[in-house]
Amino acid sequence: MILACHNLDKSFGDHVIVKSGSFHIEEREKAAFVGVNGAGKSTILKIIMNEEAADGGDVLLAKGKTIGYLAQHQELLPHGTIYEELRSAKSDIFEMEERLRSIEHELKSLSGEALDNRLETYNRLQSEFESRNGYACESEITGVLKGLGFTENDFSKRTDTLSGGQKTRVALGKLLLTTPDILLLDEPTNHLDLNSITWLETYLINYPGAVFIVSHDRFFLNRVVTKVVEIENGEIRMYMGNYHAYSEKKKQIRDARLKEYLNQQREIRHQQAVIEKLRSFNREKSIRRAESREKMLEKITPVEKPQNAAREMHFTLEPSFVSGNDVLSVEGLSKCFGHQVLFRNASFEIKRGEHVAIIGDNGTGKTTLLKILNQIQKADTGSFTLGAKVQIGYYDQEHHVLHEDKTIFDEISDDYPSLNNTQIRNTLAAFQFTGDEVFKDIHSLSGGEKGRVSLAKLMLSEANFLILDEPTNHLDISSKEILEEALNNYSGTVLYVSHDRYFINRTATRILDLVNQTFVNYIGNYDYYLEKKEELTHAYTSSGSPFSDTVPSNTSAQSQPQDTASDSKLSWQEQKEQQAKERKRKNDLRKTEDEIGRLEERNSSIDQELTLEEVYSNSVKCQELSTERSENEARLEELYALWETLAE
């Protein structure tokens, strides 16, 4: 075990982040840390790194082990270049190399014992230099930089001129090169393109130390991790396996707990009904039976109802009217920035109902294409045409559609003046904004919160052609799943840019891969794209053939089991038998209750008769009534027991 957290407690005011939370990471283990936005993942990482104080509990790092941390926001040393920043991670090795070169110069002027001593130092240093892979140090730095999407032309760029995403990539590269015994990574795939994410997956899978990752990238987690640590409602649980195994196990556990809770509630309601019925008989023995059942009921240990993870978005996307079949036609579109050609002579069409994902490396022009289609930028050459009755709804990853100086409430009310206050609040509540939260200023919101406001506006637009730029950025996994469901149920047309492979796999019916300044078309999801990528990219880029679709080959239909009909017949027969048994039980129960009622009513009549003078003065009549009442009592005892059995 390399890292352990025992009984961690942390709260901010009344908001509990974690209560008695415990988990551990083994050496060389690759583990994920998951939970909804705001659950406390980053806070726990800061507690581990001593950047935040815990209210209670302990964090234990194995003796002599080193830890490295990649936060979501990075500060780099000023004035240095990208290459110099990463080179600093290996500064001790480069210093060692300089000492070796210095000793080599000294050796020329030494002799005797001084030479022997210096040679001994030299040999020791060289042995350590080789063991730390010093001769491959430069190539390792270059490999990491290229793996993270930097070209050799980028190596000399100054770090203080980089964007936030580029700085995070530099910090990630530097951290990987320091090779600590355990890596703590907070959203490492943010700002990486698909190729860089794939490279990072392979790097981390083969990493010699342990890795603890916060990420919302389900495809990435499925490939890399073998354990999932979950924080939910202040509790921490561990699950073995990748994200898919965790998701399935969590669902099974929740379903089992919910079933156990519902079964117990059903049993409690049933017993209460039986007790009430027994009391209604108003007999000494039936009352004793009722009291006995009440005592049993009091001894039941209540099963706690499973809590929902958190407030969730809930929304639907539906166009107000249907577009024509031809939604978008792009012809000969080209765009350059200076000498950098993004794409040239691009032509493609999108039909009504298609869900098309655009993928490609960072900087190839994906977002630029969307901006051209939304007339935010102009193409250099070529044109595009929207079909009949096409209404665009645009989701911008930079949220330029939002007004920074407005409140969330005003952002909605100004754009949709026909909505009243209740309608606006109900809409915002669907996107997790309630109470005074609706009066927050847009500029004060996090990336995830701005994303939810943009999604709210997208839903209200009722557009029939959605153009989305990185819609899953800043969304937690549960919110991504809700968006996936909304898009899959959407009857309009969708064109989007995304690096989320899991999201693409779930929502795309077609993929446009922007590679070598042109679009390669795949009619299928991301799995199909992976299957055909190398073959089609090579064929298309080498032949220069006009844009064309590739259709996935037909897969053979799975044969149906031979005994399906007989299984169905058996199932139907069992159902009929079960239904017949249930009808008989209810009929017997009704008859038993009727007989109990009839006998109790007769006993009451006998009691009344025995108070009459003409009866109690007649010994024969008294004897007959007493005998009948005793027989009724015996029969009632049998009926009470039968009723309880049938009622169960």
Image: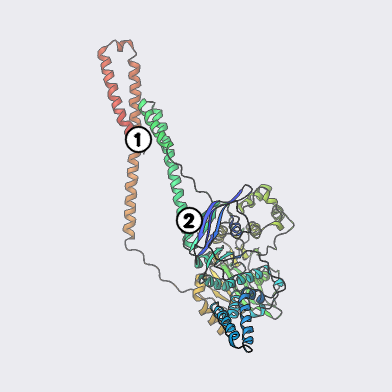
Q: Where is residue 582 in the image (x, y as percent from the top left)?
A: 35, 42
Residue type at numbered disc 2:
Lys
Query: Secondary structure under badge 1?
Result: helix
Figure check: 185 above or below 333: above
Q: In which quarter of the image is residue 298?
A: top left
Question: Image check: 551 left or right of 405?
Answer: left
Residue at image mark 2: 250
Q: Which of 422 and 115 is in front in this view?
A: 115
Figure check: 82 above or below 417: below
Residue at 65% across, 49% down: 425
Figure check: 517 above or below 417: below
Q: Residue 644 carries which label?
A: 1
Q: Residue 54 carries which label?
A: none
Numbered disc in front, either 2 or 1: 2
Residue 177 shows in this picture: yes
Query: Secondary structure under badge 2?
Result: helix
Q: Earlier in the sequence, mark 2 or mark 1?
A: 2
Q: Quadrant of residue 394?
A: bottom right
Question: Image check: 498 left or right of 530?
Answer: right
Q: How crowded is mark 2: few (under 14 residues within 10 Å), some or many (20 or more)?
A: some
Residue 34 shows in this picture: no
